[in-house]
Image (cartoon, rainbow, N blue to C red):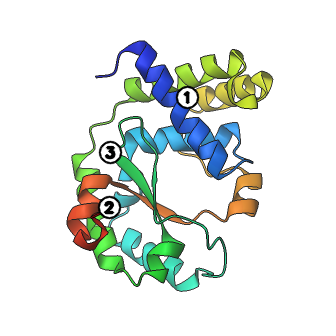
Amino acid sequence: MLNRSSSKDALWELVNFHQRLRPRLQVQDVYKLLYQSVFGVGHIIRSGPQALECLRRELDSIDLRLHPEEELVENISLNGCTVRVNLRPFMRRGLEADKLFEAMRLSADKNTGTREEFLKLWKEFGSLVRSGAFGFDARECKDFDKFVRENNYPVVHHSPAYSKLYAPSYRVVEDDTLLESFPSLHQP
């Protein structure tokens, strides 16, 4: 378990990393990032066979010309254990949807994230924003916090600006499960 100061440092590094990747990142997108980092992909997997069909449809409709600079894997957690697998580079490499879905399923089974853990991260993010970190508007953060609090901290979509600029298309998995499903991804 990370101590409070190293946890805040790791949170700062994570958000800063994603701001460098996608400079138009909004408060809503950070909320989604932190939510996924704690709870993983469980909300998608609960839909059962429809989740695999949804993945296949998304892979079939993906525009591979977009974002050629996109990395296959992006860390989304403080401990580096949870990642986003970007589907455009996934398709460019000719990787298999069924194996990715199995990695998603296994990741959901392993996930032990708690509401308390998520709320701690979200509160620390708010504290960092109020201290001037990241350049987010503190009022915007406060308003979004009020919205999610009043709605019992729901799953949210990316912000419209983020969606338009970056066309996010990914799945969330545990890094070790991804490497078990795709041994060729191991770095030499």
**Location of the C terminus (image quadrant):** bottom left
Residue in the picture at 53% in, 43% down: 33
**Location of the N terminus (image quadrant):** top left
Observer able to see residue 50: yes
x, y percent for residue 56: 44, 80
Secondary structure of residue under mark 1: helix
- Name the residue nearer the viewer: 153 or 17: 17
| Whether label 3 touches label 2, CB < 8 Å | no
x, y percent for residue 180: 20, 64
* In this view, 115 is above or below 164: above
Give the quadrant of residue 176.
Answer: bottom left
Residue in the picture at 43% in, 81% down: 93
Identify residue type, mark 3: Cys
Mark nearest the camera among 3 and 2 is 3
Identify residue type, mark 2: Met
Residue position marked by numbered label 2 in the rendering? 104
Q: CA distance from mark 3 to mark 1?
A: 17 Å
Query: In the visual, does 20 lie left or right of 102?
Result: right
Q: CA distance from mark 2 to mark 1?
A: 27 Å
Residue position marked by numbered label 1 in the rendering? 12
| Whether label 2 touches label 1, CB < 8 Å | no
Q: CA distance from mark 3 to mark 2?
A: 13 Å
Secondary structure of residue under mark 2: helix
Mark nearer the N terminus (2 vs 1) = 1
